[in-house]
Amino acid sequence: MDYNNTYKNSNNAWGAEPNRLLQMIIDDIPKNTDILDLGSAQGRDALYLASNNFNVTAVEKSEIGHNQLVKAITENNVSNINPINSDIYDFDIVKDKYLLINIQNALQFLPKEKSLALINNIKIRLKSGGIITISAFTVDDPSFKNTDQKIKSHFDKQELLKLFADFQIIYYFEKKILDKGHASAPEPHFHGTVKIIAKKI
């Protein structure tokens, strides 16, 4: 999905607060370590992580979203974010570099086979003892049956949990929830969501 128009019309398309999964584990990650934010959008999570003294690589396909993060970095004199304008699937993840890899609502825009391949690649390349945080869509999402949607990847019930069976599961949530609205869909609507925090052991 092309979010250029969404980001062009809103400097804060997903709200100001960083995602809750990061807030849950932020104190358990040693400071000054390397973190990868895949699908960083306008930089909400990347800026939060940087403000907590982490070195962040922020990868975003949307040129406008990427440029907005670059602007925020410059305006706020942030020195510990490396913004990269790239498709998350094409980004070369350096093995054993990142202690946290964050993917919030980005996997659904990849074809399912690419989504699964990316997860497998992340599992291999994540540093030992590292943590992955993922938010994604399930088959309970209305877009699953709507072929006109741009959403391509949906996870079956407990599929994501099974994919990380060889990791330590810190948190898992799977439910249909009400979204009060955001820049690209301002009216209240439901999403089938799955969220996971998993640690490589």
Image (tube, helix red, strand yellow):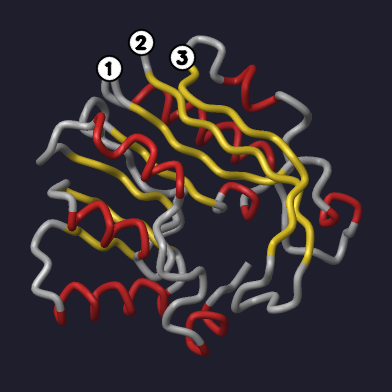
**Residue 128 shows which numbered tag?**
1
Residue 50 against residue 122 in the figure, above or below: below
* Residue type beneath disc 2: Ile
How far apart are labels 3 and 2 at the CA level?
A: 6 Å
Q: Residues within 10 Å of mark 2 (few under 14, many from 20)?
A: few
**Which quarter of the figure is the C terminus placed in?**
top left
Cβ atoms at labels 2 and 1 below 8 Å apart: yes
Q: Residues within 10 Å of mark 1 (few under 14, many from 20)?
A: some
Q: Residues within 10 Å of mark 3 (few under 14, many from 20)?
A: some
Q: Position of residue 1 (x, y in %)?
A: 63, 67
Q: Position of residue 61 (x, y in %)?
A: 45, 64
The residue beneath circle 3 is: 167
The residue tagged with tag 2: helix, strand or loop?
Answer: loop
Q: Position of residue 194 (x, y in %)?
A: 65, 38
How far apart are labels 2 and 1 at the CA level?
A: 6 Å
* Residue type beneath disc 3: Phe
The residue beneath circle 2 is: 201
Q: Nearer the viewer, residue 50 or 3?
A: 50
* Residue type beneath disc 1: Ser
Which quarter of the figure has residue 27? top left
Cβ atoms at labels 3 and 2 below 8 Å apart: yes
Sequence-wise, the earlier of marks 2 and 1 is 1
Sequence-wise, the earlier of marks 3 and 1 is 1
Furthest toward the right, the residue is 145
Furthest toward the bottom, the residue is 9
Horizontally, residue 147 falls left or right of residue 188, namely: right
Cβ atoms at labels 3 and 1 below 8 Å apart: no
